Image (cartoon, helix red, strand yellow):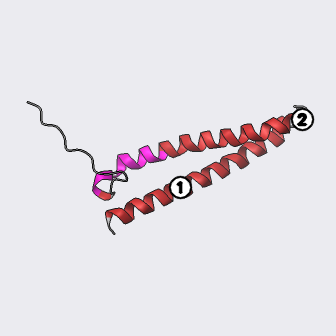
Amino acid sequence: MSKKTNTLLFILGGTVFNIIITVLCFIVFLVIYSAVLLPVLPEDSAAWALPIIFVASIAVSFFVYRLAVNLVTKKIDMEKHFDPIFGRRPPPRKQD
């Protein structure tokens, strides 16, 4: 496979991974809210709880995604297997 194909597959895989993590976090937070907090909080708390759960699931998925990307970049030489998305890196400057 070419570097461009590897880059495309990496971006698509990362996007799918991030969406799955977001959905899983949303479900987990919703279950925690309904099992633990719903009996304690007033009934009108659902109006603000769902947006908070949604934002929290996005934040947690972003954190998990960053950890996964850092782990992958430590194991794989990105410049060897992937093509730059926005253009080539400038060559290193020579020091006198």
Where residue 15 sits in the image (x, y, percent)? Answer: 53, 55
Q: What number is the disc on residue 44?
A: 2
Instruction: Look at the image and tell me in which quarter the N terminus lies.
Output: bottom left
Against 93, residue 80 (above or below) is below
Where residue 33 sits in the image (x, y, percent)? Answer: 79, 39
- Label 1 element class: helix
Q: Which residue lies furthest to the left in this view?
A: 96
Q: Residues within 10 Å of mark 2 (few under 14, many from 20)?
A: few
Where residue 56 sits in the image (x, y, percent)? Answer: 67, 38
Q: Do the residues labelled 1 and 2 touch (CB within 8 Å)?
A: no
Where residue 95 sits in the image (x, y, percent)? Answer: 12, 32
- The structure residue drawn at horizontal position 59% and vertical position 44%, both measured from the top left corner, is 61
Q: How crowded is mark 1: few (under 14 residues within 10 Å), some or many (20 or more)?
A: few
- The structure residue drawn at horizontal position 66% and vertical position 46%, both measured from the top left corner, is 25
Instruction: Look at the image and tell me in which quarter the C terminus lies.
Output: top left
User: Quarter-wise, where is residue 41 in the image?
Assistant: top right
Circle 2: residue type: Asp
Against 70, residue 8 (above or below) is below
Q: Does the magenta stretch include residue 70?
A: yes
Against 18, residue 47 (above or below) is above
The main secondary structure of the magenta stretch is: helix
Q: Is residue 90 left or right of residue 47?
A: left
The mark nearer the N terminus, 1 or 2, is 1
The stretch of residues the image draws in magenta is 68-80
- The structure residue drawn at horizontal position 83% and vertical position 41%, both measured from the top left corner, is 35
- Across the whole image, how many numbered discs are drawn on residues? 2
Decide if residue 77 is in sight here: no
3D distance between C-alphas at marks 1 and 2: 34 Å
Against 68, residue 80 (above or below) is below
Q: Does the magenta stretch include residue 93?
A: no
Query: What residue sits right under mark 1 in the picture?
Result: 15
Q: Is residue 88 left or right of residue 30?
A: left
